[in-house]
Each structure stands twice: as structure tokens, then as C-alpha cells.
Image (tube, helix red, strand yellow):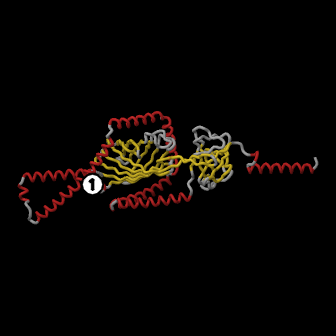
Amino acid sequence: MKTDIKVGIFALLVLALLTYMTFKVGGWGFLRRPGYSVYVNFRNVTGIDKKSRIRVAGVDVGYVEDIRLADGTAQVKLRINPGVKLYSDAAATIRTVGLLGERYLEIRVGRIPPKLKDGDTIKHVVETVDVDDLIRSLARVSEDISEFMETVSKVLSKEQIEEFRESLAAFRDLARSADVAVKANDIKLRKTLDDIDIFIARLDSVVETNKDDVNQLVANLKEFSDTLKRESPGFFSDIRSTSGELRDLVAETKPAIESVVQRTDRLTAEVEQGKGTLGKLLKDESLYQNLSQAAESVHETLGAITRFRTFLNFEGHYLSEVGEAKGRFFVTLQPRFDKYYILGVTQDPIAHVREKEIVTDGHVITREVIEKEVEFTAQFARRFKNTVLRAGLTENTFGVGVDQYMDKDRMKLFVDAWDFSNDERDSKNPHVTAGMDYFFFKYFYLSAGMDNVLNRRWRGPFVGGGIRFEDEDFKYLLGTAPRIR
């Protein structure tokens, strides 16, 4: 073979290789990768470009084929490998490799049929948090904290504020000690965190294994609720009536006490000045008996007001599955140690989940829109030694709860169940929350547990804390509150 022929063959091979690489990199023509295309819409796709990776459980399953603007949203065309099957409840989100790594699309394949075919759209989208939105959220949180501190400063007395400062100082000392302990026991702490992960996994396995027993328990609770409504239809009206009578009692008693005190002051002044008919009163047996009965009545009334206690409770929980914080405020009215009423307001981050349809290029795209709502709680509680049973209104629905106190009431294990009619979106079972509160100081406590145990869609651990204190002046405000007629 001559040299010219060899050079020509080599040139043709180089030209063929360059042509192949051009089609390969550009994704053109017959070199397009096999598979099928699906669409997904995001409000913001910063960091995602054509050829960006698509992963399922960390494994590459395709790439971004095209990105274009459609009705103010970014419509992303995905090329999925033929061996990967996506279902109707598949979800997509944008993630980052490390803190400063490349961005890619993460997809959860889902489980609910039918399977997605070529040209379908992924309806469930988890939007990423933009830095500007995060800064604005932090600014709102800062404003809420400022308003909360102003409210606390108005509610607490000077002595309570001083005790609050002492508790903060003790908390700072504890934080320093905890920092030293964490540094000294880093390996043990990591092992503890691993044990917690194992415990959560086992708890999920136990719930899944005993699903039939849990469903039977829920059925029993429903039967108990129906029995309570059928056999005691006036239960909640009795609670409202008792609350109204209690407020009326305080309101009617306060003027009588003030009147008796004023009369006593006038009588004392007249006696000191040598006026009046005190001698006659002392000799008149009937008047003496009436005066004794009046004094005894005042003593009993003051004793009832003294025994009446009120507690204010502010708390917040971070729900890991939802990625939002849930705030609650409660007032506990306790006429006796073993009997009290709980009135509260809750800021629920997932009160309503509705679907919004958007038409894009002839395709109907459905998105989930999560709405917050303020919900109310009104419960009646009875305590039997260290166990408390609660029933009533829980976040706008009927609910029940159980509290178990330990360590001289410093630790509380609790279980709450509500929404037995399954009104929450994607909830096939009632809303059940289990956890623990532990008081590290006089007013402060930390909380942890599992939220929405029976519903896989929203089930996840939560952490948080709160402040709880007794207000001696709050119970007298009930006497000055206007009555509704």
C-alpha cells in the first residue's frame, strides 16, 4: 500500500471520528440516546442547563434535553433511560452535590399507577428555596421574634423577667458545658446519633409490621368517639356551660369582696373615731351571727379563687417531613389539681393542600399548593395520679390525648389523635402524634417525637421547645371580662 493511500485512509478515519463526536456532544440526529421524554415545570431552575444530570436515589438515569419558558414558568424536558419507570405520583426537585457542587434533578419514581409514558408531565414538584426568599423569611422570623419578646415583656412581671434572665444565664453556662462535653465525646455523640437513626428505622418497621393492630386501635377510638357522642350528647355543651359558670362566679364574687372590704374600712374608721353603735352590735346575737356567716362566705370565696390556677404556654415544633415550623399558644385553666381546661390557638403549616391546574402547550399540569391556617383547640382533662386523659376539640376537629408524667412532672410522654374523618389531604388514617417534653429549667422545655405516625405522606420526626409559666394575675382578668348575652 502506497504512502498516499495510507495518509488518505488516516484522514478519513479522523474525519469520521470528528463527525461522531460532534453528533455525540450535540445530541443530534440518529445518535440521540434511547429512552422516553417527560416534562416538569419549575418556578426557578437556576443552575440547571441542558445536559444536566437526572438522578434517582443518587444513580444517573438521564439528562435534561431542553429548557424553555412557558406561561412564566420554566418547562424542562427530561430524557429518561428506558429501564427507569416513573409513576403518576412521581416527584421532582433540584439538588446540589455538596455545598458548592453542581446542581442536578432528583426524581422520586413514585408507586401509584399508571406509569408515565412519553410526553407526560410530572405533576408533583418540590421547589428549592431561593437565597433571596430565605433572607426575607429570616427577616420575617426576626420580626416575629421581636414581637414575641415585646409580648413576653408585657405579660411577665419584673420578678419573672429577672428569673427569666437567671434561666438564660444558666442556659448559657449549660451550653458552654455542653460544647466542652461534645468536643470531649465526639465519637460517643456520633454513635448516639447513629443509634437514633436506627431507632427511627426500627420504629417505622414496627409501625408497618403492626399496621393491622394500629388500625384496630384507631377503629376502637372511633367507636369510643361515637359512643361518647351517642350516650353523652351534651358533653361538650357541659364543658362550655361549666366554663361560663366559672367565669360568672369570678365576675359575681369580685364586686362582693370589694364591697365587704370597703365596708370594713369604714367601720374601722368609725370605731377609731368613737362613732357608731359597735357596742349594740356586739350585744345583738342575731346581728353577730349574720356577720359571722358573711365572714365565712368571704373566706370560702377567697379560698376558691386562691386554688384556681392559670398557666400560659408558648411552643414551636419543626416538622422535618413538611420542612415548616408549627407554633402553638395554650391557656390552661385549672380549678383543681386533677381537673383543668385547655384553650389554644395553632398555626398549622399544612392546614390545606389543594391542587392548581395550569395549561401549558395543550398539557394540563397539576401542582400542589400548601396553605397555612389558624386552628383552635378546646379540651377537657382529668388527671389520675401521673396519667392525664384529654378529650375535646383539637385543631378544629374532635380529638383525644393521653399524657404520662414522670420524674416529678419534669418529663411528659404524650400521644394525641385527631382528624378521625381523614379530612387532611393524602391522609388515609387519623392524625396521631407521639413525643416527649422535658423541662430543663423552671420555665423552659424541649420537645421531640414523631408526627402523623399513621400517614406515610406526612410522617416524620419533629423537634422543638417552648416556655410555660403560671400567671397569678391572669385569673382575675376573667372576673373583668365582658359576658356574652
How many numbered badges does the structure rendering display? 1
Residue for badge 1: 479
Residue sitting nearer the eye, 268 or 434: 268
Q: Report if residue 280 is visible in the image.
A: yes
How crowded is the residue under tag 1: few (<14 C-alpha within 10 Å), some, or many (20+)?
some
Horizontally, residue 2 falls left or right of residue 199, namely right
Q: Could you tell me residue 246's position as x and y percent?
A: 27, 49
Residue sitting nearer the eye, 112 or 216: 112
Tell me if residue 362 comes above or below residue 206 in the rendering. below
At horizontal 12% and vertical 53% (from top left) the residue drawn is 291
At horizontal 7% and vertical 56% (from top left) the residue drawn is 282
Horizontally, residue 73 falls left or right of residue 401, namely right
Query: Which residue appears farthest toward the right when viewing the image?
Result: 2
Q: Report if residue 317 is visible in the image.
A: no
At horizontal 93% and vertical 46% (from top left) the residue drawn is 1
At horizontal 59% and vertical 43% (from top left) the residue drawn is 90
Q: Could you tell me residue 419's position as x and y percent?
A: 43, 42
Q: Amino acid at mark 1?
A: Gly
User: What kind of element bears circle 1?
Assistant: helix
Residue sitting nearer the eye, 343 or 156: 343
State the image quarter where residue 166 is shown: bottom left
Horizontally, residue 276 falls left or right of residue 200, namely left
Q: Could you tell me residue 71's position as x and y percent?
A: 61, 53
Q: Could you tell me residue 404's position as x and y percent?
A: 37, 43
Residue sitting nearer the eye, 109 or 450: 109
Horizontally, residue 431 falls left or right of residue 71, namely left
Tell me if residue 135 comes above or below residue 372 in the rendering. below
